[in-house]
Amino acid sequence: MPRVKRKRKLKSRKKTLPRSNLFLILALVFLLALLGITLFGFQSKTNGIKVIKQTFFTPKLVTIAVISPYPTNYPNNNNVPPQKNLGFCLYVPVLTYHHIQPENEAIYKKQTSLSVDNGMFDQQMAYLIQKGYTPIFANELAQALISHTQLPGKPIMVTMDDGYADNDIYALPVLKKYNIKANLMLATGLVGSNADMLNWSQVNDMKSSGLFYFTNHTWSHFSLNSGTIEKKQQEITLAQNQIKDNLGQDVNIITYPYGSFNDAAINVLRQLGYVAGFSTIPGSYQCDSFIMTLHRLHIGNAPLSSYGI
C-alpha cells in the first residue's frame, strides 16, 4: 500500500507543475541560440573561400580568403579576389582589351561590352607615354618573376584577347604612332573563321611591326576548367604549334579563355613547359607565387586614370 500511495503522489505533482518555469527555460535557450547566431553566423567553405553566411540576424556578409598558390576550380575567375602578395612581386598593371573600333561599329555589331573606341584607345596610349610607363611583352614579365629581377621604368602590359580583325585595322596604327609594345592572346582556331576575326596575313602584319608578342589562348577558345586531360593537351599544343608554324615564335605562356582554369589545367601546362599564365583576376601586382594566374585589369571606354593607372 505505501508504494501505491507514493506513485499517486508523484502523478499529482506532475499535473500541478507550473508551466511558467518551462516557458522560461525555453525562452532562455532561444535567446542563447539567437546570441550565438548573431555573433558567429554559420560557416561553410566554397572553392577555397571560407564564408560566414549571412542570416536574418547577421548584420552583413563576411568573407575570409584562404590563400593558396593559385585558386582552383572556379568556373569563371572574374569574381575571384586577388591572391595575397607573397614571394617576389612586381607592380605591373596588365591592361585587357578585346575589340578596338569606332563606337558606332561596336553598337551596330552589339559588341560594346568588350569594345573600346579607337579614339579613346589613342588617348589611353598617349596617356601611358605622358606618364612615363614602359610597355613590355608577356615573356619579359615572366622572366623577371622567375629570375627575381626588376623591370626598367614603370612597366605596364597592353593585352588584346582572342584575335579580332579590328586589332590590326584600328589598334596597330595607334601602337605604331606611340611605339608601344602589346600582346595578342591568340585563339588560333578562330583565325580566318569569319570577317570579324584576324586572318593569318593580318596576324603576320602585326608581328612584322615588332610591337607584338603572342600568347597561347587555346585553339578554339576552349574553357580549360572543363574537358578531359587529353582535350586540354590538344587545345594547348595545337595553338602552340600553329603560332610556331605561322609566326616563328615559341610559346610557353597561356592566357585562359573566359579566365577559366583549374588544377588539372595548370598541371597540364606545367608538363608542357609553360612558365606563366594570365587570368582575369583583377589586380596590378604580379607575384611568382601565382605566376600561373597573373592578374589583369579590364579596360573600357574611360581614361586610364579612372582605373588607378
Image (cartoon, rainbow, N blue to C red):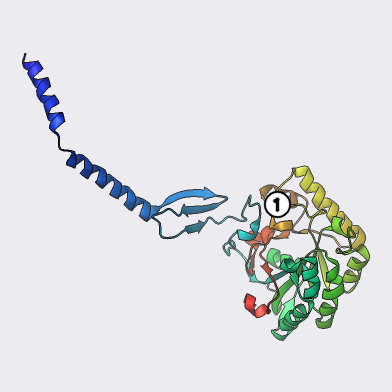
Q: Quadrant of the C terminus?
A: bottom right
Tell me where residue 303 appears, x and y as whole percent: 68, 79
10 Å crowding of disc 1: few (<14), some (14-19), many (20+): many
User: Is residue 27 or residue 210 the one in the foreground?
Assistant: 27
Determine which quarter of the picture holds residue 253.
Answer: bottom right
Residue at position x 91%, y 72% in the image = 208
Spot the residue most to the bottom: 130
Tell me where residue 213 appears, x and y as whole percent: 82, 67
Spot the residue most to the left: 2
- How many numbered discs, if any? 1
User: Is residue 265 or residue 78 the one in the foreground?
Assistant: 78
Q: Is residue 35 visible?
A: yes
Q: 93 left or right of 111? A: left
Residue at position x 14%, y 25% in the image = 11
Residue at position x 79%, y 55% in the image = 221
Spot the residue most to the front: 108
Q: 172 left or right of 47? A: right
Q: Is residue 24 above or below residue 56?
A: above
Tell me where residue 13 appears, x and y as whole percent: 12, 29
User: Is residue 91 or residue 39 the one in the foreground?
Assistant: 39
Q: Is residue 132 above or below residue 267?
A: below
Q: Is residue 256 visible?
A: no
Q: Quadrant of the N terminus?
A: top left
Tell me where residue 128 appears, x and y as whole percent: 72, 81
Q: Does dot 1 land on a helix, a strand or a loop?
A: helix
Q: 251 left or right of 144? A: right
Residue at position x 72%, y 65% in the image = 142
Residue identified by numbered label 1: 266
Q: Amino acid at mark 1?
A: Ile
